[in-house]
Amino acid sequence: MMGLVPWRLWLYGGALVALTAGLWGIHRHGYTTGYEAGSAAIVAAWDADNVLREKTRQRAQAAAGEELRRQREITRDVEQNLTARLDAADARGRDLARRLRDALTAGTCPLPQPGDATSPADGAGEEPDNQATLGAALADHLAACEHDAQRLTDLQTWVGRINRN
């Protein structure tokens, strides 16, 4: 079979195969090296991004924990204050009821006695004779309304701060 194909053709064919294999090996080595270097750069970028994301998550979690602690403290303070105020109101109500019972039994209470069908006329349906008395009563009433309006405004401001925080 060698005789039919000249020896130069075998030599050129072998050199061409060797050259092709060498070039393919060089290309393969360059591709593999570049791919590995690119992959390492991508992995490093991902790792840096993951570290940054984890730090951000930890900061957000710490801030949320602090906010939760602060809200719980505000809630506890409001509940304690409310409990104290309700206890004080209950004590005042019980004291008032006791004093009314004592006054009713002593007969010094200005309220009608139980069993009286009518109460004495208090003059509420009549027009006052003295306009100065009417003006003073109206001024007292308006001052009380202004005081209540200020307290309501303060309460709304306080509730607004809680909702914003």
Image (cartoon, rainbow, N blue to C red):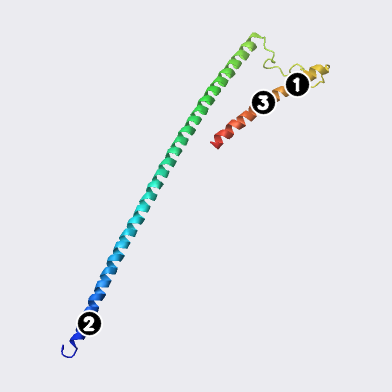
Where on the picture, by quarter, is residue 126? top right
Q: Which residue is mark 2?
A: 12
Q: Secondary structure at mark 1?
A: helix
Q: Are marks 3 and 2 in contact (CB under 8 Å)?
A: no
Query: Which numbered tag is attached to residue 8?
Result: none
Q: Position of residue 132 (x, y in %)?
A: 81, 17
Residue at position x 37%, y 47% from top? 51
Q: Which residue is mark 1?
A: 139
Spatial distance from mark 3 to mark 2, Cα to Cα? 110 Å
Q: Are marks 3 and 1 in contact (CB under 8 Å)?
A: no
Q: Position of residue 17 (x, y in %)?
A: 23, 78
Label 2 Cα crowd, 10 Å radius (few <14 / some 14-19 / many 20+): few
Closer-to-camera residue (93/9):
9
Residue at position x 53%, y 22% from top? 84
Q: Amino acid at mark 1?
A: Ala
Q: Secondary structure at mark 2?
A: helix
Label 1 Cα crowd, 10 Å radius (few <14 / some 14-19 / many 20+): few
Q: Amino acid at mark 3?
A: Asp
Residue at position x 70%, y 25% from top? 146
Residue found at the very far bottom of the displayed protein = 4
Depth check, mark 3 against mark 2: the one in front is 2
Horizontal relation, residue 155 to residue 138: left or right: left
Q: Is residue 162 above or below residue 50?
A: above
Q: Position of residue 73 (x, y in %)?
A: 48, 30
Query: Which numbered tag is attached to residue 148?
Result: 3
Label 3 Cα crowd, 10 Å radius (few <14 / some 14-19 / many 20+): few
